[in-house]
Image: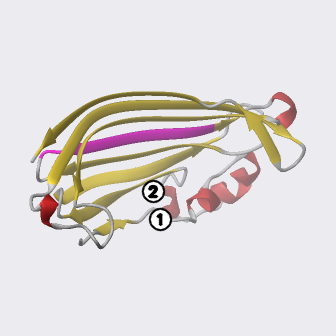
C-alpha cells in the first residue's frame, strides 16, 4: 500500500523558545526577527493514503514557562481533514511545575473520525478476503499522566486514560 505523509515540524523549535535570561538578546534582535514570536510555530501538513485520499491540515507547538518552573513547557497540536470527509484533531501538553523541580503533567486529548482497512494477515492470505473490510470509528480519547522525578533520570506517576469509540464496519 502507498502511504506518503509530509509534516514538517522542526526539531529546532525548542531552541527558539525564550526565557527571562534572553531578554537582553531579544532587545538587540533585528527587525525581521521582531516580526515573529519564536515561542509559537505552526506549519501546514499534506498527506496521502489510499484509505483517506489527500489530507490537509496544520501542526504546531507553543512553548512557555510556568511561574518559577525549571523547564520550558509546551502545547502541541495537529489537525487534518481529508477529501473523504474524515478528520483527526489532537492536542498534547507537557507542563513542568516549580515545586521541588520534580513535578510534571502530560496531557493529551484527541477526536477523530478515521478509517482503517483490513486486508488479511501475512503473505499467505487467501482469496477469502476478496473484498477488503472497511472499518471506521468516531472516537474521543483523553490521557493524563501526573509524574514526579525520582532521582535525576527516573519518573514515577500514574496513567489515567479515557476512550470512547463508536465503530462501524462495511464491506
Give yes or no for contact between labels 2 and 1 (Cβ–Cβ under 8 Å). Answer: yes
In the picture, measured across the screen, residue 104 lies left or right of residue 119, that is right
Q: Where's residue 53, x and y in %? A: 15, 60
Give the residue displayed 21% in from the left and 42% down from the top. Answer: 136
Label 2 packing within 10 angstroms: few (<14), some (14-19), many (20+) = few
Residue 127 against residue 107 in the figure, above or below: below
- Please tell me which residue lies in front, 117 or 114: 117
The CA distance from mark 2 to mark 1 is: 6 Å
Q: Main secondary structure of the magenta part?
A: strand
Q: Where's residue 129, x and y in %? A: 15, 59
Does residue 86 belong to the magenta stretch? yes
Q: Secondary structure at mark 2?
A: loop
- Please tell me which residue lies in front, 119 or 93: 119
Give the residue displayed 14% in from the left and 60% down from the top. Answer: 128
- Please tell me which residue lies in front, 160 or 12: 160
Which residue has dot 2 on it? 35
In the picture, measured across the screen, residue 65 lies left or right of residue 132, that is right
Residue 130 against residue 151 in the figure, above or below: below
Residue 15 against residue 168 in the figure, above or below: below
Looking at the rendering, the stretch of residues picked out in magenta corresponds to: 85-94
Which residue has dot 1 on it? 32
Amino acid at each position: 500500500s502507498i502511504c506518503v505523509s509530509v509534516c514538517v515540524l522542526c526539531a529546532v523549535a525548542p531552541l527558539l523558545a525564550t526565557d527571562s535570561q534572553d531578554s537582553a538578546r531579544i532587545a538587540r534582535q533585528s527587525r525581521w526577527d521582531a516580526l515573529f514570536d519564536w515561542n509559537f510555530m505552526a506549519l501546514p501538513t499534506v498527506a496521502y493514503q489510499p484509505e483517506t485520499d489527500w489530507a490537509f491540515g496544520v501542526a504546531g507547538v507553543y512553548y512557555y514557562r510556568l511561574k518559577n518552573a525549571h523547564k520550558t513547557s509546551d502545547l502541541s497540536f495537529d489537525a487534518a481533514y481529508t477529501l473523504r470527509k474524515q478528520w483527526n484533531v489532537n492536542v498534547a501538553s507537557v507542563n513542568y511545575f516549580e515545586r521541588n523541580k520534580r513535578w510534571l503533567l502530560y496531557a493529551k486529548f484527541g477526536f477523530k473520525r478515521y478509517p482503517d482497512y483490513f486486508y488479511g494477515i501475512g503473505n499467505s492470505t487467501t482469496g477469502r478476503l476478496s473484498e477488503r473490510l472497511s472499518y471506521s470509528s468516531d472516537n474521543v480519547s483523553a490521557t493524563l499522566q501526573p509524574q514526579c522525578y525520582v532521582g535525576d533520570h527516573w519518573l514515577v506517576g500514574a496513567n489515567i486514560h479515557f476512550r470512547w469509540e463508536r465503530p462501524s464496519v462495511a464491506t
